[in-house]
C-alpha cells in the first residue's frame, strides 16, 4: 500500500519530535496492512529492528530538543542520526519483501533526510 503524500511536508515549521511522530505514523500505516507472519525471518527481523529504531530515534530526538548545552545536543543529534540511518536500512530491507513500495521508500527516505537535516 502506498502512503498518501502529505501536502508540503517539508515546508512546515514542525520541530524534529513532531517529524518523528509523523514518520512513525506513516510506517505504522504501512505495517498495519502487512501480514508479518507470512514474511521470511530476515524481513520480520528487519521490521522488528525498524520498530526498535523508531523507539531509539524518539528517545534521542527528544533528548536533543531538551539538551541544555550544545555538546550534549550534538551528541544526541549524532546518536539520533545513527538510528535514522539504521531505520532507513531496515526500510530498504523490508522493501525487498514488498512491505514498502517504491513510493513508500521514497517518501520515508525524504522524511528521514529532513530529520537528519533538522538535527544540527
Image (tube, helix red, strand yellow):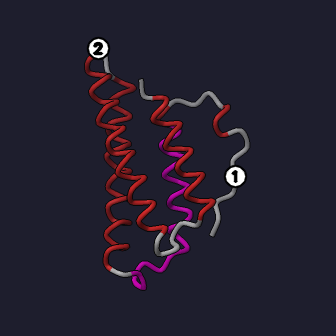
Q: Are marks 1 and 2 in contact (CB under 8 Å)?
A: no
Q: Position of residue 3 (x, y in %)?
A: 64, 60
Q: Where the N terminus falls, by quadrant?
A: bottom right
Q: Residue at x 37, y 58 (%)?
A: 50
Q: What residue is drawn where x is 39% and y is 83%?
A: 37
In this rendering, is residue 62 above or below 6? Answer: above
Reading the chain from its start, which is encountered first: label 1 or label 2? Answer: 1
Q: Position of residue 106 (x, y in %)?
A: 59, 53
Task: Say how many tags the image has.
Answer: 2
Left/right placement of residue 25 relative to residue 41 reads: right
Task: Report if residue 33 lies within the magenta region.
Answer: yes
Q: Residue at x 32, y 74 (%)?
A: 42
Range drawn in magenta: 17-39
Work out whether 57 lies above or below 42. Answer: above
| Mark 1 or 2, closer to the camera | 1
Question: Is the residue 93 above or below the residue 74 in the image?
Answer: below
Task: Classify residue 45 by image quadrant.
Answer: bottom left
Q: What label sits on residue 49 in the rendered view?
A: none
Q: Is residue 15 magenta?
A: no
Q: Residue furthest bottom?
A: 38
Instruction: Decide whether the magenta segment is chiefly helix, strand or loop.
Output: helix
**Badge number at residue 5:** 1
What is the quadrant of residue 104 in the picture? bottom right
**Is residue 35 positioned above or below 51 on the image?**
below
Alpha-carbon distance for marks 1 and 2? 36 Å
Q: State the residue position of label 2.
A: 69
Label 2: which secondary element: loop
User: What is the quadrant of the C terminus in the image?
Assistant: top left
Which of 24 and 117 lies nearest the eye of the viewer?
117
Amino acid at each position: 500500500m502506498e502512503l498518501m503524500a502529505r501536502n508540503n511536508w517539508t515546508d512546515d515549521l514542525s520541530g524534529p519530535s513532531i517529524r518523528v511522530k509523523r514518520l512513525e505514523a506513516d510506517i505504522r500505516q504501512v505495517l498495519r496492512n502487512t501480514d508479518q507472519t507470512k514474511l521470511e525471518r530476515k524481513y520480520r527481523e528487519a521490521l522488528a529492528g525498524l520498530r526498535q529504531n523508531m523507539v531509539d530515534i524518539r528517545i534521542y530526538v527528544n533528548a536533543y530538543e531538551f539538551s541544555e548545552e550544545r555538546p550534549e545536543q550534538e551528541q544526541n543529534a549524532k546518536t539520533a542520526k545513527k538510528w535514522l540511518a539504521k531505520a532507513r536500512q531496515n526500510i530498504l530491507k523490508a522493501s525487498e519483501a514488498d512491505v514498502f513500495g517504491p513510493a513508500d521508500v521514497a517518501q520515508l527516505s525524504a522524511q528521514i533526510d529532513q530529520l537528519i537535516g533538522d538535527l544540527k
